[in-house]
Structure formats: C-alpha cells, structure tokens
Amino acid sequence: MFLKHLFPRGAQVPAPSSETDFSVAFRLYQDGRLDDAERACHDLQGAPQPDVDYLCGLIAQARGDHAGAVGAFGQAVAGRDTEASFRFSLAQSLIELGRHDGAAPHAKRFLELAENSDPRRVAAWMMLFACGMCLGDRSGADECAEQAIAAVPRENPEFLSSVADGYLLECRVDDARAVADRRIVLDDSFAARIRRATMLPQIYDSPEQIHQVRQRFSAELDELLSRPVTPVTDPPGELGLLPFYLAYHNENNVALLRKFCAVVRRAFHASTTLPARSRPPGPIRVGFVSTYFHSHSVGRTTCGLIRDLPRKRFSVHVFAIAPADDRQRAAIEAAADHYHRLPNNLRSIHRAIVEANLDVLVFSDIGMHPTTYFLALWRLAPLQVATWGHSETSGIDTVDYYLSADGVEGEAAQEHYSETLLRPRAFFLPGYERPAAAPRLSADSFGLASGRRRYACLQAQFKLHPDMDEVFKGILERDPQGDVILLDSRPSWSALLRHRLQRKLGEAAQRVRFLPRLQHERFLAMLAVSDVSLDPLYFGGCNSSCEAMALGVPVVTLPGSHLYGRFTTALYEELGLQDGVADSIDDYAERAVRLARDRDYRATVSGEILRRSGVLFARKDLALEFARILEEKVSTSA
C-alpha cells in the first residue's frame, strides 16, 4: 500500500521495565526470525503486557496477518491508551484490512500524542488522506495530503513519493504526477523519475486515453534510457511501482515491458549469471516463489502444481513471502518438501533461494508485486520460469520460459511473450480445488430487488475496459427487467466508472448496481443468486469462472487474443459446451439475455454445467506435463 515509504525502517517500541528478555525478543523480530520472536514473547516474564501485545502485533504485521495484528495492537491500546506507537500501528493494520472508518480515530489520536519531530506524522496524515478518500470525503482528504506535504522534511523528499502514491491509488494521476514533480525538484534521482513514468491509471475513460497513456509511458522510458543514472540499492522501496495496469489495455506489452526492464537494470545491478557449478545427483530441485501463497487466486492456482510434481523425481521448495495465515497457506506448506516462510525483504529472500541451490525457480506471478519482480532480475537458478498467476509476460531477460497451456493460447501466442512459451497439451488448471458450496442467501440480503434479472460482473473494476460498456448497454437495452451488478473496488474508482457509464448508457446506467466488496463466502452467495455471470472483455476471469461453473451459473465470454482473455473459453471447451461463448459483442449481449430470460434454456445449460463440471477440478495432467518438460530442459542444460 502507498504508505510503505513513510514508515520508519525500525518500529518504535517503548522501553519496557524488564528490558533484557524483551530486547532479545525484539531483536529476533528485527532479524526476521518471526517464529523465534513469537516463542520468545510467549516466554516473557515481567515485561509490561501492553509492550508484549505490541510486539506480537508487529510480528503478525510482518507476516501479513493484519487481522491478528489488529487484535494484538488493540490489546496494547487497551492496556496503555496514551502510547503513540500503539495507535499508529493499529491504524496502519486497520487500513490494510480496508477498515478506514476504524483507522481514522487512531491516526488522529497518534497526531495528538506524537512529538512534532516524529517522522511518522507524515504517514499519519497520509493515513487520514486514505481514510478520507475511501469514505468519500475528498476535500478532507486533500487537506490531509497538504498537511502531509507540509510536514515532509526537506532532507527526506522520498516521503513525497508516498503522497503521490496516495493520489495514484485514487486514480488521480495528474495530481500524483504533480507531487512527483515536486519530489524531483528536491531530489532529481533516477528512481524518482522511474516512479513518475510508471504512474498509470486504473480506470480509463476511453480507448483513446489508453493509447495516450501508453505513448507517454513509452516516451518517458526512452528518455530514461538516455539520461544519467543514480544507482538503486533497494528497488522495492525506491521504485515500488510496477506497470501492472498495462495488462488490462488489450495490447501486446512485450516491447514496453522489455523496455521497462532495461530501464530498471540501468539503476539496479542484479547479477544475470550463476557461478559455475556441477549439478549434484538426486531429484531435480524446483523452487516456487510468491508473495501470494495464501488465500489468493495465485495460491489457489499454484497449489496443485506444487503438490503434484512427482516426488521420486523432484524435490520441491516453497518460498512464501510474508503469507497470511489461512487454510490455503497451510495447504501449500503441506504440499512442499521444504517450506521457507520469509519476511518481505529482498536480500533475505535472495539469500534463501541461493542457499537452496535450485535447478529450476518458478515465479508463480511476476508483475503484481515489486518484491518478486525485482527478485526475477537476478539469475538464481539455471532455469527460471514464470507462469500465469499474473497472466502477462514479464519482459525480464533472466526469465527463460513461460508456462501456459495449449488450450488457452492462440496460434501467434509466442509474439505476446519475452520468454519462450511452454504450451503443453494439458488442461491449463493444475489440481484446482472445487470451491465450497455457496451459503444460501436471498437477493435482498445484498440490497437487490427481487423479481429482477441479475447480470453479475463481480470483478475488480480495473478489468472493465471501456469496450465492456457496449456489452452492458446491449444487455440493458434487450432486458428492461435486468440489472448489471458490479463490485465497488474503491469509491474513487466507482465514481469514474459511474461517470463513464452514464455517458455511454444514458438512463440505463441507473440499472447498474454497485455492491460493496464481498468476503469470499458472500461472493459465492452472490454468484449463486445471479442469472448470468459476465466475463469481462479482454482480461477475463479464471477463479471466478471456475467458481460460477461449480455452482452451475452460466458464464458468458468473448474469447480474446491473449492468454488472459481465454480462460473461460478453455473451461467451456473442457466441458464440451459452447452456449456461453460469443463471437462478437452483439452476440455476447444476445447470449446473456437469452440465458437470463429463457428459464427452461437456462435450467438446461445450468444442469449440464453442473453435471460436467467435475472434470475441471483436481487435475494432475499439467503438473505431470510440466515435470516431463523440466526433466528434458534440465538434462539438456546439464
């Protein structure tokens, strides 16, 4: 989140009365030995309980367990409500959980308690900025941002990067770039210019705006390739931003992502070669790395690949970076031969992977999180492979292969990748677990009127390319009793999307309903009461389409030209059904409306989806094909 550049390197912990034992526990936390630190906390005697609770919160925070952190920080505040550090950390974790209404009072109280010289005051103002934007108080948020800018010490211009990131998070790119320019005036570093170039909108008003943004990004990268360089030693901290939103433009991004890699390499010198070594005998050592090895789409789509590589021939390491503690994380740990739970620290992760002496390193996603992107710039194994946790090429020259599958790629697919494309003839989804049954809820429990037809597009708003508006328009024109259901990712994004839809749809835009973000069980329940699930154009669903089909809900899709637009079509091909696969935007709207309005037809299609859907789950064929490919590649490279 955008506040990360504002937080001091070391957490501030008040000195307890029993210093010796507490100091040992705190040093363990600082060293990233989180399990040891937690055990030390449990064994502490004599230290004030609020301090112990606070350290437990810091440990949970470092693991990405913000719910646990909130509980521990809350106990610390209850035990000593005048401690500024407790309030600050509690507000921070509440924001990470999206609980902005709860975070704001603690951030305000921190500002009352903290010394004027405390560098965290800038972060507290920015937390209040985030709260204001998410709670719809734009003017109050802007005032907090100006307070933060005024509080930035001139000798710490990097704080302005977080102010800019705050605006960027709300899709206020012009405001973000203006603050980035102020930062460059204070410190014209190469990293600051990369950050400004990489400020891309999440929501677009038109295809023309997409074209203009891409042109500007390309031109600024060209300028960076020719200007003097100042070195970067901590790229996640100094650069932070990635061109993630390029993937939703429906364009071939190979050239831009290669150029971005070349720009970053000028500043960050990661070794692209391995020291000479001979491969020891024994199973092929394969590592998987991600920041999302928990209950996340990446965790769900990678777990089967980790589990099903044949263990007589492979030894599997998992490098889980700050994973949340949940059932999916535990399943991934159980599937690994060697499980490494690591703090989100680039050098620590690099060291752990090097020490594992791997034959193959698999990046389950590249381009979604700064840590794994910059990690991939190193040569850490003789073979390095990306796969479709983020369904886009990396553009990185030290990533050799991209694991996909034949059924989700078109004939000219290699043109979309900087890596050599692997497209085994196997079902693309490895060992995917069938979703649990949805809770039985009525439409009115979501605030939706009964007796109306529901066309649900329950996707992140940045997936909604401006061309998707034509699909919504076609559906609403054909079905006066129909409503399109969308998710409210962020209030500021929804405001931009509503404005776009009002212009495109006119009065029909009143029948586009926005639901608040849904926990997974309510997401499944909302799918279950939908007549049709709408797959976004160009960058469609995968997990969400599997979940809909597991519930027997028809999904309508228009296959795209890239991997990320072909998952749902591949699912239907595996089922042997084509009722939801359209060949044009007009046909898309027609199929969706027929499925929703013709109850008998929908019941037939739904029944067939349910009857056949078992073939989508717990499949081992991709893992076995990947094993065969790896054996071939390792033997030829030895």
Image (spheres, rainbow, N blue to C red):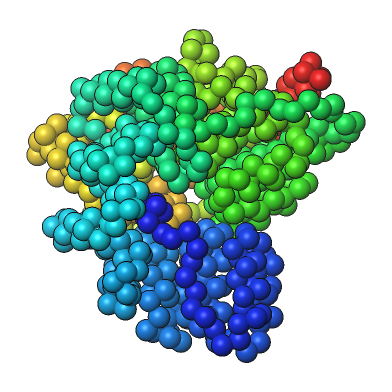
* Residue under the image location 50 percent in, 27 percent down: 265
As rendered, which of 473 and 53 lies closer to the eye? Answer: 53
What percent of the width, then of the height, locates residue 459? Answer: 37, 42
* Residue under the image location 30 percent in, 20 percent down: 219
Quarter of the image containing the C terminus?
top right
* Residue under the image location 66 percent in, 87 percent down: 45
* Residue under the image location 62 percent in, 22 percent down: 401
What percent of the width, then of the height, locates residue 111? Answer: 28, 72
Q: Is residue 503 visible?
A: yes
What percent of the width, then of the height, locates residue 568? Answer: 47, 30
Question: Seen in the image, is 127 located left or right of residue 268?
Answer: left
Query: What is the quadrant of residue 511 in the picture?
Result: top left
As rendered, which of 4 and 423 lies closer to the eye? Answer: 4
Question: Seen in the image, is 180 located left or right of residue 511?
Answer: right
Question: Seen in the image, is 334 located left or right of residue 135?
Answer: right
The residue at the far top in this view is: 412
As rendered, which of 552 and 516 lies closer to the eye? Answer: 516
User: Is 128 above or below relative to 394?
Assistant: below
User: Is 433 above or below relative to 83?
Assistant: above
What percent of the width, then of the height, locates residue 412? Answer: 49, 10
